[in-house]
Amino acid sequence: MTKKIEAIDPGSVYGRARLWRVSHCDDPPPLFLPNIRRPVPTGKQAWVPIGPWQNNLLLYSWAAMASHLFRGSPDGKKYHVSGGYIEFDNSGSSITPPVPARNAGHSYYNSLVAPQDYLRVPITATVHGSSGVNFPDGNVATFFLQTSGSVGFKNGLTFSDAANSRVFGVGLVAMPVPGDDSQDIIFNRLYFAQADQVPKLAGSQIGVTVEVVFG
């Protein structure tokens, strides 16, 4: 008799994110203070939090990432989270955030049309932490990424203050073949309320912190 494989409780893996204003700073703050989840600056940068944390939705495709990683990635590709999609809108005002679905990964991003687009950016830093005494070896992965470049990846829209660009969503991705976005595996998606969407300002970028808790 074949024994039924019990599914992992979806509530055992969850995440959240928040947005930050990233600007040049001659006297940057300390690197990382775990008790306040302060990001790691890259070079001389200051990260100033904007708005509250927002919960994410894990896509079904995250299971493919885990399966490859747990088996040691026998095909030699890199299935860890190595980048992210930062969505922006150029309409000049905040938008009603989309409602993500667990089966909507590439199909969603490929359906974006003007005035919306996204930036495909690398992870800039990660931190390993713990959510409590039950996890002395750690169970929290924190990822840092930020806007970079001035052209959207899907529609070629300009990302700038002059174009009234406003960040409204983010998703973490694995990039098994960095030069081939069709092979990206999307881990999660999340969107910020209208009041918490952040416009691009001259002389600064928009940072994102994403925390993922296992267990």
Image (spheres, rainbow, N blue to C red):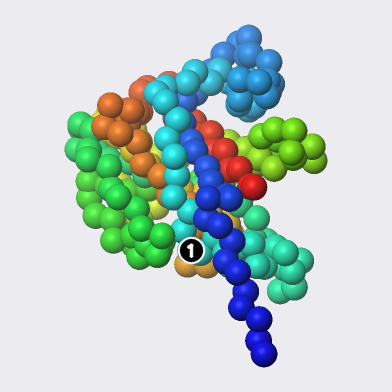
Q: Residue at x 30, y 50 (%)?
A: 99
Dividing the picture into quadrants, the one containing residue 149 is top left
Let me know if residue 177 appears in the view.
no
Question: What residue is at 61 percent from the left and 78 percent from the top?
Answer: 4
Please say if 173 is above or below 166: below
Q: Nearer the viewer, residue 68 or 58?
A: 58
Q: Is residue 156 left or right of residue 68?
A: left
Estimate the x, y position of residue 49 in percent, counting from the top left: 47, 21
Count of numbered tags? 1
Indicate the quadrant containing the N terminus: top left, top right, bottom left or bottom right: bottom right
| Residue at screen point 66% across, 81% down | 3
- Badge 1 crowding class, 10 Å Cα cut-off, few under 14, some 14 to 19, many 20 or more, is some
Return the residue nearer the eye: 211 or 115: 211
Residue 144 shows in the view: yes
69 left or right of 85? right
Left or right: where 138 falls relative to 210: right
In the image, farthest residue toward the right: 137
Three-letter amino acid code at disc 1? Answer: Tyr
Q: Residue furthest top?
A: 27
Q: Residue at x 48, y 36 (%)?
A: 17
Residue 81 location (% of width, % of height): 61, 52
The vertical placement of 174 against 198, above or below, is below
- Residue that badge 1 annotates: 60
Residue 96 point in image, percent of width and height: 22, 40
User: Dividing the picture into quarters, in which one does residue 127 lie?
Assistant: top right
Q: Is residue 25 above or below residue 186?
A: above
Label 1 element class: loop
Q: Position of residue 39 (x, y in %)?
A: 60, 26
